[in-house]
Amino acid sequence: MRDRLTQHHLAMAVNLKQGEFFIGQNHGVVTTILGSCVALTIYHAPTRTGMMCHGMLPTCRAEHLVEQDHCRGWDANCFRYVDCVVAHMLTECADRGLPYRELQLKLFGGSDMLIHGRSFHKSRFSVGKANVESALKILSTVELQPMRVDTGGHRGRKIVFFLESGEVWRQWLLSKREVCLLGDPFAPKPSSV
């Protein structure tokens, strides 16, 4: 994946951390690493406006909730919660005059990271699954659905979002066990002479 990123892209890259939200236009790349967290990308092609969030937990239980079950204050803590940050993204779209019908939405993440290599009980709560459900629930309130959903599973993902095109790349991450078996995947490979 890194081979296809130009120096131009890398110079304008933003690494989104847990509980953060980004909005930008025209150029640049936004990246993030996901496990049970989710990232929603929203892209408006006519204005080349892109947004991405990195939500950690499904719902906000703060005292400042309103009837729509999402935060009112839009403080930095709000962006940790999937329901709040997705609602904030939709508000940003409305405030900027971006018609919902012109938006390209993509949802990623929501892995069940605690299941790999352990016994699984179907009744166990999955934060990843709850994060995905929370995002889809908020989107459904305005009759929106992601055009691409890449969620679930038992592995992490690296997401690369290009603001100039709305294109999103996903790279699977190796589990600790796979890294041990394969060695360091980023170590230089021996060249043949």
Image (spheres, rainbow, N blue to C red):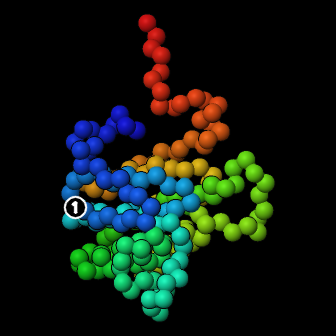
Q: Residue at x 31, y 40 (%)?
A: 5
Q: Position of residue 193 (x, y in %)?
A: 43, 6
- Residue beneath disc 1: 25
- Residue 148 vs residue 126: left or right? left
1 to 126, vertically: above or below: above
Total label count? 1
Of 2 and 62, nearer the camera is: 62
Q: Position of residue 99 (x, y in %)?
A: 29, 76
Q: Residue at x 50, y 66 (%)?
A: 56
| Quadrant in the rendering for residue 175 | top right
40 to 170, vertically: above or below: below
Specify the amino acid type for callout 1: Gln
Which residue is most to the bottom? 67
Q: Position of residue 84 (x, y in %)?
A: 44, 77
Q: Position of residue 117 (x, y in %)?
A: 73, 47
Are there few (<14), some (14-19), or many (20+) residues within 10 Å of tag 1?
some
Asked whether residue 179 appears in the rendered view, the answer is: yes
- Residue 92 vs residue 130: left or right? left
Which residue is most to the top? 193
For mark 1, give the secondary structure: strand
174 to 53, vertically: above or below: above
In the rendered view of the protein, which quadrant contains the N terminus? Answer: top left
Asked whether residue 146 appears in the rendered view, the answer is: no
| Quadrant in the rendering for residue 43 | bottom left
Q: Residue at x 65, y 39 (%)?
A: 177
Q: Residue at x 34, y 37 (%)?
A: 4
